[in-house]
Amino acid sequence: MKPIEIQIHQVSGQLGLNITKPNINLKITAPDIQMKTTPVNLDLTIEPPEIFIDSRAAFDSMGLQGVYSFGNSLAEEAKQACVQGIEQRVSVMHQMEDPHTGSIGEIIAAASKPPEKQVVIGLSPSVGPDISAKLGTIKGTYTPARIDATVKEGTITNNFTWGKVDIYMEREPSIDIRT
């Protein structure tokens, strides 16, 4: 008898894994703030005060005069001096005509003598100056400071894919028996 020879050939099965890792894909957009500032503005319109001093009455009370008043009084004095000069010349001529009045030199010397004049010196006026004032004004326009802001919020976008494991048969198990 011959022995039976049995050959057994066994192949183990083999599993394969297909692994997909999880993926986190974050897209981040930063927030955006846009600011526009307007500074404070103050516009002032100033009208200065005015002070009016009329000292003509005070000057007149002291015998002093303002420019126009002094000019007018000098013009009046000039008119009177002119009239008096004419009268004096006529008087001198009449004296020269009369032989009993004296010599021509004496007549001219007497006529050339300046007239006496009374001058009053006073330093304090009896009437005060007329003082008036117009108040000044300040008009202002105030514009407060401003901040105009535009805010664009940031965003976070999550693109997440789950990981997975796929199992497949890479090699089928088998048993091969031969005799």
Image (cartoon, rainbow, N blue to C red):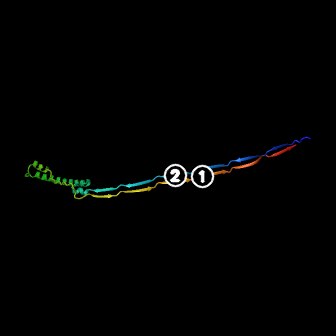
**Image check: 117 left or right of 154?**
left
- SS of the residue at dot 2? strand
Going by the picture, which residue comes out furthest to the left? 100
Marking on residue 82:
none
Task: Kindly identify which residue carries mark 1.
Answer: 155
* Residue at 83% over, 45% down: 175
- Rendered-image quadrant of the C terminus: top right
* Residue at 52% over, 52% down: 35
Report the number of discs: 2
Residue 130 rendering spot, x and y as whole percentages: 27, 58
* Residue at 53% over, 51% down: 34
- SS of the residue at dot 1? strand
Disc 2/disc 1 C-alpha distance (Å): 20 Å
Mark nearer the N terminus (2 vs 1): 2
Marking on residue 35:
2
Say which quarter of the image contains residue 54.
bottom left
**Image check: 61 left or right of 18?**
left
Whether pointer 2 and pointer 1 mark residues with C-beta atoms closer than 8 Å, the reply is no
